[in-house]
C-alpha cells in the first residue's frame, strides 16, 4: 500500500462525502422530519454500509462487472427506479408530530442496503478503489474503506444537523411540503449524471 496516496484519498473522501447526493439529501430530509436522534441508525447504516461496500467492491465485485457488463447496466436501471421511488416518498412525507408513529426514518439495515443501489456510492467506491490504491491487496482496500468510514460519518452528520435545524423553519405544513418536494426534486436531479453520463 502506498501511504503517499492517503492525503489525496482523504480529500477525495471528504469532497465526495460532503457534497449533495442521494444519501445526504435523504439525511437532510430525515433530520428535518424526524430529528437527529431518530436519524442516527440511518447515518450509521450509510457510514458502515458504504465502507463494507468498498471492501467488497475492491475484493472482486469489479471483476464481475468486467466479465458481465450487463450486470452493471441492470444495477444502474434498478438504482434509478429505486431512487425515483425514494424521491416520491420524500416528496410525500407527512409531517411527524411528537408521539406520531406514522412516519419512520430509514433503519440501519435499509440505509446499509441502499448503498448497493446508490449511483453516487458506486461511483465513489469504484473511483476510490481504482484511483487510490497502488495495489489491490486486502490491506490497501481495507485502508481505503477505513479512510472513507472515518471521513464519511462526520460529513453526513452535517447534513442531518442541517435538516434538524431546518425543522425550526418548517413549523407549518405548507413549508414542510415545499421542503419535502424540493428534497425529492433534488434527489431526482442528482440522477442526471447517471442517466445522461
Image (cartoon, rainbow, N blue to C red):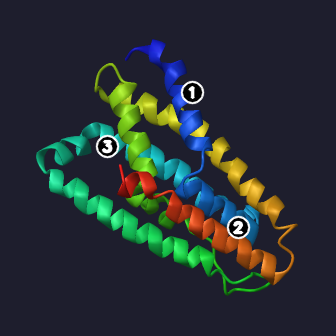
Query: Within 10 angstroms of label 3, few (less than 14), some, or many (20 or more) residues?
Result: some
Q: Picture quarter containing residue 14?
A: top right
Residue occupied by mark 1: 11
Q: Picture quarter containing residue 160?
A: bottom right
Q: CB under 8 Å between callouts 3 and 2?
A: no
Quadrant containing the N terminus is top left
x and y, in percent, of residue 23 in the image? 55, 56
Q: Mark 3 or mark 1, which has the lower sequence index?
A: 1
Q: Mark 3 or mark 2, which has the lower sequence index?
A: 2
Q: Mark 1 or mark 2, which has the lower sequence index?
A: 1
Q: Residue at x 62, y 82 (%)?
A: 92
Classify 80 as above or below 1: below
Residue occupied by mark 3: 57
Distance from label 3 to label 1 (Cα)? 20 Å
Residue occupied by mark 2: 38
Q: Residue at x 46, y 75 (%)?
A: 85
Q: Residue at x 63, y 66 (%)?
A: 183
Q: Is residue 104 left or right of residue 22?
A: right
Image depth: mark 1 or mark 2 in front: 1
Classify 21 as above or below 186: above
x and y, in percent, of residue 41 in the image? 61, 61
Callout 1 secondary element:
helix
Q: Nearer the viewer, residue 139 or 174?
A: 174
Q: Is residue 66 left or right of residue 137?
A: left
Amino acid at each position: 500500500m502506498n501511504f503517499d496516496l492517503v492525503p489525496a484519498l482523504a480529500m477525495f473522501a471528504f469532497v465526495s462525502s460532503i457534497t449533495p447526493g442521494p444519501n445526504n439529501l435523504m439525511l437532510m430530509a430525515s433530520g428535518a422530519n424526524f430529528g437527529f436522534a431518530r436519524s442516527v441508525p440511518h447515518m450509521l447504516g450509510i457510514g458502515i454500509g458504504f465502507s463494507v461496500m468498498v471492501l467488497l467492491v475492491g475484493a472482486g465485485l469489479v471483476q464481475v462487472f468486467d466479465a458481465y457488463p450487463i450486470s452493471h447496466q441492470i444495477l444502474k436501471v434498478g438504482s434509478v427506479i429505486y431512487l425515483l421511488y425514494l424521491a416520491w416518498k420524500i416528496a410525500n412525507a407527512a409531517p411527524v408530530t411528537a408521539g406520531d408513529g406514522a412516519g419512520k426514518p430509514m433503519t440501519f439495515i435499509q440505509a446499509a442496503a441502499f448503498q448497493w443501489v446508490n449511483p453516487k456510492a458506486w461511483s465513489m467506491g469504484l473511483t476510490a478503489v481504482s484511483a487510490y490504491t497502488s495495489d489491490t491487496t486486502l490491506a490497501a482496500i481495507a485502508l481505503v474503506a477505513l479512510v472513507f468510514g472515518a471521513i464519511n460519518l462526520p460529513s453526513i452528520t452535517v447534513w442531518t444537523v442541517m435538516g434538524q435545524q431546518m425543522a425550526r423553519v418548517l413549523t407549518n405544513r405548507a413549508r414542510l411540503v415545499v421542503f419535502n418536494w424540493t428534497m425529492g426534486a433534488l434527489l431526482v436531479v442528482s440522477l442526471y449524471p447517471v442517466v445522461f453520463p
